[in-house]
Image (spheres, grey):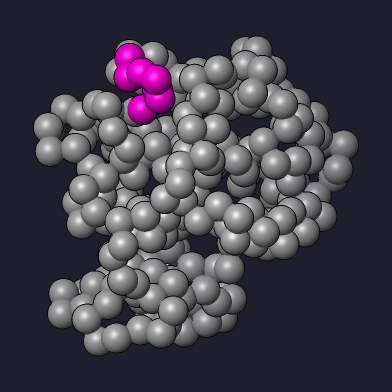
């Protein structure tokens, strides 16, 4: 999408990772114009927008740059109406995104292991019944159970939030088969509410499904060997 001077600019890799996707999809679903600036590492570091040296980054015209997942999600949530006005429910959204960050960090840590056997053993330990990743995902499952929304088990209240979009994409990532050593059925068979939320968002008519799913196949699934 071509940018205008008044448009937001979301900067990230050409990947559908949850850290950027929750904001990207919220803006898309709400019809908020934005530049979807996808680029390589060199382009991101040259952009001058990485305040903390991390990504994604969101350039807000006339105001400045946001450069942390939680801050971007919260800001975009306010813009799109996908962030609760109730302080407690808003905090539950933050809690869910923080929990997903912890899950992602676990997987990222394993990517530093160069020995394939040790990497697989590490990941097997994470997803064991008493593993750290299982514990964290149980926490997210509990958030959905405590909220009690029906028929869709949202994180906070009875409507879709940026936290739900983050969970949707993270569950899709973990269940895609791109993370060697973590079975695609791991979440589906262990965390029914997380899986139900993922499926509900997948079927949302406002989401960019056929194009998105096509991009998902091309952009994400081919990177398996890098993980």
Expressed as whole percent of the image width and height from the top left, the position of residue 157 reads 24, 26
Was residue 190 drawn as part of the magenta stretch in this picture?
A: no
Q: Nearer the viewer, residue 185 or 33?
A: 33
| Residue occupying image coordinates x 56% and y 26% | 195
* Left or right, residue 215 beside residue 4: right
Q: Quadrant of residue 66?
A: bottom left
Expressed as whole percent of the image width and height from the top left, the position of residue 133 reads 58, 26
Number of marks present in the image shown: 0
Q: Nearer the viewer, residue 23 or 149?
A: 149
Q: Quadrant of residue 101?
A: top left
**Quadrant that contains the N terminus:** bottom left
| Residue occupying image coordinates x 31% and y 40% | 161
Expressed as whole percent of the image width and height from the top left, the position of residue 58 reads 33, 68
**Residue 135 seen in the current view:** no
Q: Quadrant of residue 166?
A: top left
Please name the predominant secondary structure of the magenta segment in the image.
loop
* Left or right, residue 29 beside residue 92: right
Was residue 152 drawn as part of the magenta stretch in this picture?
A: yes
């Amino acid at each position: 999408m071509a940018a205008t001077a008044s448009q937001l600019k979301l900067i990230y890799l050409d990947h559908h990772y949850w850290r950027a996707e929750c904001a990207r999809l919220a803006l898309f679903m709400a019809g908020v114009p934005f530049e979807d600036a996808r680029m390589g590492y060199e382009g991101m570091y040259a952009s001058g927008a990485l305040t903390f040296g991390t990504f994604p980054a969101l350039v807000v015209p006339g105001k400045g740059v946001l450069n942390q997942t939680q801050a971007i999600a919260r800001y975009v949530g306010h813009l799109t109406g996908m962030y609760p006005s109730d302080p407690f429910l808003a905090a539950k959204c933050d809690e869910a995104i923080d929990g997903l960050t912890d899950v992602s960090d676990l997987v990222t840590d394993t990517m530093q292991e160069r020995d394939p056997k040790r990497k697989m053993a590490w990941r097997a330990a994470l997803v064991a019944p008493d593993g750290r990743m299982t514990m964290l995902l149980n926490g997210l499952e509990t958030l959905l159970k405590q909220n009690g929304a029906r028929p869709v088990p949202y994180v906070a209240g009875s409507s879709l939030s940026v936290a739900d979009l983050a969970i949707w994409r993270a569950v899709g990532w973990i269940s895609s088969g791109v993370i060697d050593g973590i079975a695609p059925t791991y979440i589906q068979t262990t965390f029914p509410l997380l899986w139900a939320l993922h499926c509900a968002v997948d079927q949302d008519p406002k989401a960019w499904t056929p194009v998105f799913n096509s991009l998902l196949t091309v952009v994400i699934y081919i990177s398996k060997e890098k993980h």
